[in-house]
Image (spheres, rainbow, N blue to C red):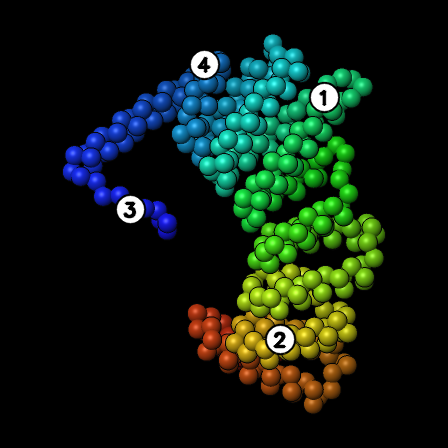
Amino acid sequence: MHGVKFVKYSREALAAKKERELVKLREYQTLTAEVLTRKKAKDLTQESFELTTKLLQVNPEFYTIWNYRRNILTGRVFPERYSPAQINELLSNDLSFTTTLLKQHPKVYWIWNHRYWCLRQVPDGPTEADPNGWRQAYWNKELFVVERMLDADPRNFHAWNYRRYVLEQMPVKRPEQTELAYTRRKIEANFSNFSAWHQRSKVLASMWEASKLDKAKSLEEEFDLVKNAMYTDPNDQSVWIYHRWLIGSGEDKGILDREIASIRELLEEQPDSKWCMESLVFYQRLLLRKHEGSVSGEIRSRIEGECLELLNKLQEIDPDRKQRYADLSASQTPSHAV
C-alpha cells in the first residue's frame, strides 16, 4: 500500500461503495456458475468461449477456466471447420488477449501457461514452401514482448523462463553471443538481477559444452564481471551465488587461492560483510577438502582458526542464523562447508 493515497469516505459514500462491490461480486458469482455449468455439460460453443474470455478478464488465476478454454479450441475449433490460417489467427488473438492480461498480472502462472500452449499449437504455414514462417514470426514477436516485460520488471522469473523457452524453440536460432550481451546489459543495469545471472550461467554452460567459447578465457572474463559486482554491492546474494557457480567443485587450486585472496581484500574494506565472511569459510574449507595434500599442517591450522573466527563473528552480525554458524563451528571436518 506504499504510495497509495488514503481516501476517507463519508458514511453514505462508504455504503454506496460497498453496494457497488456487492453488485460486482454477485455478477462474478453468476458468471462463474454459468461457465462451470457449461464446462460440466461439455458445451464447446462460441458463446461459451466468449464467456471464458469475460470470466478470465475478471479472474485470470482461475486455471479451470483456462483449461476449459483450451478444451473448446481443441475439441471444436481445431479438428473441424477451421483452416490453418484461421487457426493461426485465433492463436494470435489469444496471445494478444494474454498480453493484455499480463500488463496487469505479470506473475500469474496460468496466463504464462496459456501462452506456452498457444505457441505449441501454431500450425505449419503460411505455405508448404515456408512451413515455419508463422512460427518464426510468432517467436520474433514473443521475444519482443518478453523483452518489454523484462524492461518493466527485470527480475520477473516467469518472463525469464518464457524467454528461455522462446530462444530454445525458435525455428531459426539467434546467436548465443546475442544472449550473453543481453544478460550483461541486464546485470550491469542491476547487479541484484538473479534471473539474469542464472540465464547467463545457462548460456555459458551450453557454449562451453559445445566448444563455442574458449572456457578458460571466458571464465576469467566472468570473474572480472562478478568481481566488479562484488565491489559495487558486497551484500548482494545474487553475485555470490554466481561466483560459487564459477568456482564449481574447486578443482583448480590456483583459482581458489586467487579468489580467496580477493575476497579477503574486500573484507578488509567491508569488515561486516556477511557474504564475504561466509564465502571465505566456504572456499577455505573447500580448499582443505579438495587439495589436502598440498596444504601443510601449519597452513591448515591457520585456515581452520580463521574459519572459526569468521563463524563466531557471523553469529554476532547475523543472529537469525546463529545456530547454523554455531553448528559449523562445532564441526571439526572441512567437509561441512557453508
Residue carrying label 1: 124
Residue 157 appears in the figure: no
In space, the residues marked 1 and 3 are separated at their CA atoms by 54 Å
Q: Secondary structure at mark 1?
A: loop
Residue at point 50%, 36% (across, down): 103
* Residue 126 in picture, x, y percent from top left: 73, 18
The 10 Å Cα crowd at callout 1, few under 14, some 14 to 19, many 20 or more, is some
On the rendered structure, is 1 left or right of 336? Answer: left
Residues at marks 2 and 1 touching, judged by CB atoms closer than 8 Å:
no
Q: Quadrant of the C terminus?
A: bottom right
Tag of residue 6: 3
Q: Secondary structure at mark 2?
A: helix
Q: Amino acid at mark 1?
A: Asp
Residue carrying label 2: 266
In space, the residues marked 2 and 1 are separated at their CA atoms by 56 Å
In this view, 308 is above or below 201: below
Residue carrying label 4: 47
On the rendered structure, is 90 left or right of 24? Answer: right
Q: Earlier in the sequence, mark 4 or mark 2?
A: 4
Q: Secondary structure at mark 4?
A: helix
Q: Secondary structure at mark 3?
A: loop
Residues at marks 3 and 2 touching, judged by CB atoms closer than 8 Å:
no
* Residue 37 in picture, x, y percent from top left: 38, 20
Tag of residue 27: none
Q: Nearer the viewer, mark 3 or mark 2?
A: 3
Q: Amino acid at mark 3?
A: Phe
On the rendered structure, is 171 left or right of 26? Answer: right
